[in-house]
Amino acid sequence: MDFVRNFPFMSIILSLFSGPLTSILNGKWAKRLNTLVIGTVGIMSSFVLAYTLKTKQAFVYIMGHFPAPWGNEIRVGILEAFMAVFFCIIMMLCMMGGIAEREAEIEESKQNLYYIMVNLLLCSLLALIYTNDLFTAYVFVEINTISACGLIMIRQNGRNIEAATRYMIMSLLGSGLLLLGICFLYDLTGQLLMSNIKEAVQLLAASGQYHVPLILALGLMSVGLAIKSALYPFHAWLPDAYGYSTLSSAAILSSLVSKGYIFLLVKIFYRVIGFSVVCESRVINILFVFGILGMLMGSVSAIKEKDIRRMIAFSSVAQIGYIYMGFGLGTEVAVRASVYHILSHAATKALLFVAASGLSDSSGGSRHYRDFTGAGYRNKLAGVAFTVGSLSMVGIPMFSGFISKLLFAQAAMGHDRKMLPTLIALAISTVLNAVYFMKTVIRIYTPVPESAAIVSQRPTVECRRVNWKEQPAKSVSLVFFILLNLLLGLNSEPLLHLIEAGLGMFE
Amino acid sequence: MSKKVPQEQYEKTISYKFRQWLNGSKDPYLDTVEMKPQVPFCETESERLQREEENQQLAKKVYDLEHNAEIRLFGKMYKVFSVIFCLFLVTMLLIGVSYLPTFGHPENPANNEVSERYIEKGLQETGAVNIVTGMILDYRAFDTLGESHVLFIATCTVLILLRLDKKELQKSNEANDRIYEPKNDVILQTAARILVPPIFIFGIYIILAGHLGPGGGFSGGAVIGAGLILYLNAFGFEKTEKFFTAKTYRRLSFGALACYSLAKSYSFYTGANHIESIIPLGTPGAILSSGLILLLNICVGIVVAGTMYTFYVMFRKGGY
């Protein structure tokens, strides 16, 4: 067996082990260890990706001395390895972007606790990506939930505690439904291993036996994960959680935590239930309807919002809606588009959060939309980055958002009943996105007249120029985010092949 | 302006009209538009006061929660809909359950080769007389590894929420009656003196005998944690902090979890690479048997006991 095959297991254990290790370190060393762990895991995952691309087949790694249905195992294919690499890159950039905010907003004695949360979050994301066992997935969903709560409430003011409480309640409801779904499936099939459940489910679906509980289990798992990833009617926790937590938490939560759950749902669709069974059931129609509602309502709420962080947060609701709409279409092409949108949204949303914080640095720390007048001139890099992110979200060619919208539209073409609603929703949603993102871009590039004193109901904000050297880590992360966005937007063809091959390995 | 054609003719061309439209001086639908330069916003003192007053009145009216019919309606509907939602969920789940295979039937799908091997070969393969322990700490050790980290991260979250800094702790100590601890309640102290040692010994027994009979790290750790809490209540923080502080907890839990991770990494690594594990299984039934299970049980026990005690202290005092 090649040594590279050990790397997925090693990256999980390394990030898991770094959690308790961080608890005996102080803040400074905890930060270094965290960077080291994310970097090492990223490098190891890229080796795994190269290996799977070379061998062109997935491999199974037994966790222990007992083979699959008795022991645990993890399974690594192209898409899994790619996701791991991608998540590591995004996490690294998010952590880099938020250094200054973390130091200012988190108490000195609690710094290392923050890094424990991040390390274990990384571990749980990796385990969710790699696992081949439904129950293992549930255990790591728990770790993911608790660490996400910790990330929200590390900044201790009233809004954050409230946001964390909301997040916890909604997220636990989601976990509970997921667990119920897993129990139902176990009762019907007697297995917890994904491949074995799939065999049994195919037999049950073919014979028509236990039809009701099977659909119920699928529904429970889909709804549970949809709640956890903030699909439209279950998004009440999201704006506060993303809007008031410290910068790197908001970026990580929006771009990684929700995406981890969505990736698990893709795995459940493909590897546990079987995609044909999922498509035959009516569960995907529900996801489709709520996805489209989310696309529209999320944007409408974002237009109303005056706080820029909350505005970006509401835009997440709309983007998650896109992803679920893709699942709802129920074709291979649409799921590919959804997976692409996971990547595109993860790269863009984190960029927007970091850029918005850069703009607010130059506007006296305010987050109110009105105070951002001319901020693009005061902090040039953040202004450019915010523009790139906005253009990508709206779906302008060259940027990643365009590709995913194009893919969704292509996937909808020729679909007998869902073509028209999808295309109309895409069009309306694009216009709505443009309304609030372009409004902000125009606002940050509106020069402030020197002579006219700005008289507003609130005291004028303290404007100052921000040089890129002031916070080099944030500037570097912004530059990398912009490059990543352009890479996703201009170089989508190989990525699409990779996603196609990866989804093919799920069978 | 044009140099080649006269002004009147030039005014009729499309390019001139386009330029006018671009300048904003003429609208194709409204005809000529009068452009006004923007004046800086200024207001007198009285205007400002009036505006502020209006704003305040508006805010008062909007946030008058007691007399707001909409909010009251929302509150009522909220209750109604939550009851309806719960009933819907309960009915749906009950219907789902009624379709499931009969409970305890031998032909059920859950009674398959997986549980068969656990029951028939469990003793031989893991060396643990207690099959459940063998299952969670050997067959499916990866899940349990995750589960023990769930406990660890839960403690960390509680620490984030409730831990106070040293200075704040002193302040809060002076502000409330915890400073009068211990209360020196004779009944409690006597009972604790008698009870605490057997509780500890019983907890340790449960942990050590986890692979031989009912018990294991989780339950034994909980018993020891309860003993620690009883001791703390009887004798106060001064006594317990002599042997158990935050630092001790951090080191203990790190040691236990590190030990667990390393031990399990070894067995995962050897298992996946098909290397023979050097850890002997021993004779079933002996205390030193069943490979790593005893060690793992001790690790889990330490983590659980520390977690319980830390939760209690955090909720009570916010630091130790």
Image (tube, coloured by chain):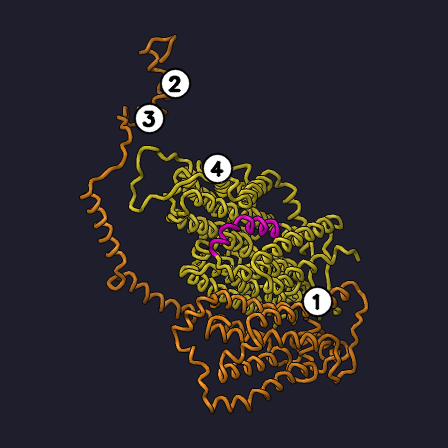
Chain colours: A yellow, B orange
Tell me the kind of residue under disc 2. Answer: Ser
Q: Where is residue A431 in the image (x, y as percent from the top left)?
A: 43, 41
Task: Assess whether residue A264 is covered by the magenta stretch.
Answer: no
> Distance from label 3 to label 2 (Cα)?
14 Å
Q: Do labels 3 and 1 share a chain?
A: yes
Mark closest to the chain's N terminus, 1 or 2: 2
Q: What residue type is labelled 4?
A: Lys
Q: Are marks 4 and 2 in contact (CB under 8 Å)?
A: no
The quarter in which the N terminus of chain A is drawn is bottom right
Q: In this view, does A356 lie above or below A327?
A: above
**In the picture provided, is A464 more to the left or to the right than B284?**
left
Q: How far apart are marks 1 and 4 (CA)?
A: 48 Å
Can you give x and y, in whole percent of width and height, for residue A70 in the image?
71, 71
Q: Which numbered mark, 4 or 2, is in the foreground of this view? A: 4
The chain letter for the residue carrying disc 4 is A
Instruction: List the residue tagged with mark 3.
Output: B24
Residue numbers of the magenta segment: A86-105
**Callouts 3 and 2 on one subunit:** yes
Q: Quadrant of residue A134?
A: bottom right
State the residue position of label 1.
B262
Q: Residue at x 45, y 88 (%)?
A: B185
> Which disc number belongs to residue B15?
2
